[in-house]
Amino acid sequence: MKKRFLLIALALLLCVGNVLAETGGSEFALFKRNVAPVMKWGENGILTVPKATTLGKANFFIGAMGQQAGQLQGLDIYNTSLSILAGTSDDVELGYTRRQIIWEDLFFSNLSMDTFHLKTRFLNFGDYLLPQAAIGVNAVSLVDNKFEDRNDILFVPFIAVTSTIPIFTPKMLFSVTAVVETIMNENELGLFQFSGGADLNLFNFLYGFAEIQGFDLNRQANEVLNVGVKLRLGILSVGVGLFNISVNAGEGESIFDQYTSALTDLANANYMATVGLDIPLGKKAAQKK
């Protein structure tokens, strides 16, 4: 009997059963965290929402994440991830993520998952103001971490558009990102999901983030909000995020009124801590005029 790993099973239990039907915001957010790499927050991604920007040619990033995942037989268990991302060119980024469930005594369980990532920027008018756009895909095997049968691989293709705006100086940057993505398995596409977010870079030292997942103009507010902060010191960065903040629908006749009066609920929110190591071997491409 083939062994199936717990991480994707949890996500599939909530999400993939509805791939061809309707996927809720919280289930989608959980699924995203189980397929997204540990990104370089604020540079090639927000928290779990990918940005259109890439690492750059010959640049590498190693990121690790840890999050409490509940208890089993009285022991805490943690969901951990280790990602290695590489910029193979100024517009192409490849990555690999290894996920592992560990016990509170730091012993590894036999539950793990591999994910491969590809992102390609196809539109780049420059660093600032005008948008950049990229397409990408995350791929995870549903059986034994083997990527042998296409029907046993779950693909998450996406399109990301990012615009970066300097605030008085290039040392203070405000960036906004919009993403549309879906789930594909056995050549079948699910519903398209919309996410977005913003990040603020202060002197390449302090970063702030906010992102919303599962956005749907045709429904009342049912999205999930994630927020976080990151400190960067040279090649080292550390960050903390608060995930699964529920957005409860507000009152009003219009979508605008409902969202502006929506309330947030921290009852199911949880923390995630990250650490990253940036290895800048390459040089950033010159800004296009």
Image (cartoon, rainbow, N blue to C red):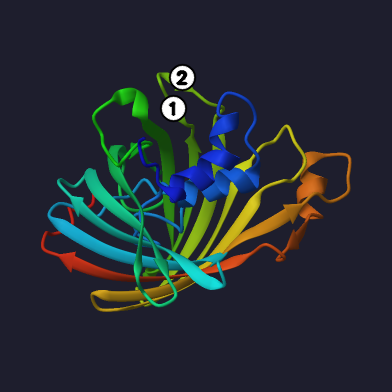
Amino acid type of disc 2?
Glu
Dot 2, how many residues are within 10 Å of its Cα: few (below 14), some (14-19), or many (20+)?
few
Mark 2 lies on residue: 188
Is 184 above or below relative to 101?
A: above
Residue at the location (32% across, 45% down)?
A: 115
Is 103 above or below relative to 183?
A: below
Front one among 232 and 182: 182
Amino acid type of disc 1?
Met
Residue at the location (39% across, 55% down)?
A: 45
Snapshot quadrant of residue 159:
top left
Residue at the location (23% across, 61% down)?
A: 61
Front one among 216 and 133: 216
Mark 1 lies on residue: 184
Is 171 above or below relative to 264?
A: below
Residue 82, percent from left and from top: 30, 61
Residue 252, percent from left and from top: 88, 45
Is 17 above or below relative to 224?
A: above
Could you tell me if residue 177 is visible in this image? no
**Where residue 112 is drawn, which disc sits there?**
none
Residue 283, percent from left and from top: 13, 59
